[in-house]
Image (cartoon, helix red, strand yellow):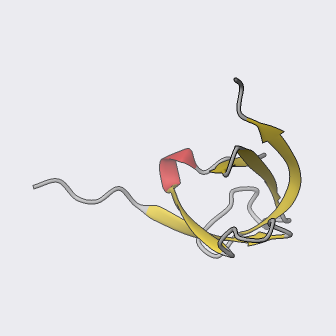
Amino acid sequence: MGSAEPTVEVTLKGAPDGMPETVLVRRAELPRDRLKIPFRAGYEHFVPQDSPRGVPEDGAVFVWCDRTKFAE
């Protein structure tokens, strides 16, 4: 049996209505610069708030910065 891939819980600030306030992200996929989350008909983009080590960890806070639509 394989072990579960480690995840990190991050808090989303400024997210659109209806989005969760926290999400679990696979540690291997946790970006240093921008988190892109599919939501409704597009992607919500979040950037990390200051992280003391430059690498977001469990409990990291990401702030909403942009939205893009899915390509048609």
Q: In the image shown, does 59 or 66 lie closer to the viewer?
A: 66
Q: Is residue 71 above or below residue 47?
A: above
- Can residue 68 be seen here? The reply is yes
| Residue 56 image point, x, y percent | 68, 61
Q: In the image shown, does 68 or 72 lie closer to the viewer?
A: 72
> Residue lying farthest left?
1
- Can residue 32 be seen here? The reply is no
Query: Residue shown at 81%/65% (left/top)?
Result: 16
> Residue lying farthest top?
72
Q: Quadrant of residue 69?
A: top right
Query: Residue shown at 86%/69% (left/top)?
Result: 14
| Residue 22 image point, x, y percent | 63, 73
> Residue lying farthest right?
65
Q: Is residue 2 above or below residue 10?
A: above
Left or right of 12, for residue 8:
left
Query: Residue shown at 76%/56% (left/top)?
Result: 54
Q: In the image shown, does 17 or 66 lie closer to the viewer?
A: 17
Total marks in image: 0
Q: Quadrant of residue 6?
A: bottom left
Q: Is residue 42 above or below residue 25?
A: above
Q: Quadrant of the C terminus?
A: top right
Query: Residue shown at 69%/76% (left/top)?
Result: 21
Q: Quadrant of the N terminus?
A: bottom left
| Residue 10 image point, x, y percent | 64, 69
